[in-house]
Amino acid sequence: MGTELILAPDAREYAELLGYRSPAEVLLDSRGRTIRCTPGRRTTVQALPGGRRVFRKLRSSRPARAMEEWANLGELRDAGFLVPQPLMFARRGGATALAFLDVPGRPLDVLIAECERPESKLPFLTQVMALSRRLHEQGYCYRDLYWAHLFAMDLDREAGPIAMVDVERVFKPRWRRRRWLVKDLASLLASWPAARPPRSLMLRLLRAYLGDDFAAEWKGLGRSILRRAEGIRARRPRFGDMGFGS
């Protein structure tokens, strides 16, 4: 299948800093700390001078999945969404490595769980639903829209931009679009960081998402979201964390 090394336009300085000149050097670099490991995939993180961190997603097979994530990172950045800055894509045979920079802040599920005042969570709920609606209006569906995949600064500060990570499954459905829209919203409801989401969460979520369309659409959409959310919460995690994280 050959070898390939693709550098993002502004990534050459990082390649030189890391000493990457070939696909093998990206794939076989033993530096960094493993933060996630599943069959066929491993994610590492390495600190860089100046405080930034570089992540590498290493896959032993399915190179098409890595290419999809590489393409999604570039396309979503061009569309105005905040996602990790892609650095390089390396392939040697069926093995691939995707390197990208970190995003500011921490996962929203962690920030929300740490928040003692319920009212402090509301600005971020509103902002995440606005982000979800903008994503859907541009034709995208996330398919992994969990609070752990959304990063922000501290909840006590002014709400800043929300970053999205793990965007490998983002796509533009050509049919059954409502099904995937419901899946995105149900994923947010199901992954709320509590044993049981508060009863008011569904209505708050829908009011923020639907805006002026709330009165006409909330009942039918709400029923679909609740059914899907129950299925998501009942599903046994494959690798211990419902697939969240990098």
Image (cartoon, rainbow, N blue to C red):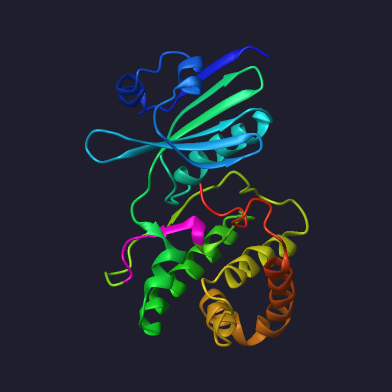
Q: Horizontal and vertical percent for residue 15? A: 36, 22
Q: Horizontal and vertical percent for residue 202? A: 59, 81
Judge whether residue 57 can be spotted in this image. yes
Q: Horizontal and vertical percent for residue 98? A: 51, 31
Report the residue at 62% width, 57% height from top. 242
- Magenta range: 148-155
Would residue 101 be counted in the magenta stretch?
no
Q: Horizontal and vertical percent for residue 77? A: 45, 44
**Location of residue 195 with respect to 96 vertically, above or below:** below
Residue 226 placement: quadrant: bottom right
Q: Residue furthest right?
A: 176
**Location of residue 238 with respect to 194 vertically, above or below:** above
Residue 136 placement: quadrant: bottom right
Q: Residue furthest left?
A: 50
Report the residue at 51% width, 71% height from top. 193
Q: Nearer the viewer, residue 180 or 53?
A: 53
Please identify the quadrant where the N terminus is shown.
Answer: top right
Would residue 149 be counted in the magenta stretch?
yes
Q: Nearer the viewer, residue 161 or 215?
A: 161
Residue 67 placement: quadrant: top right
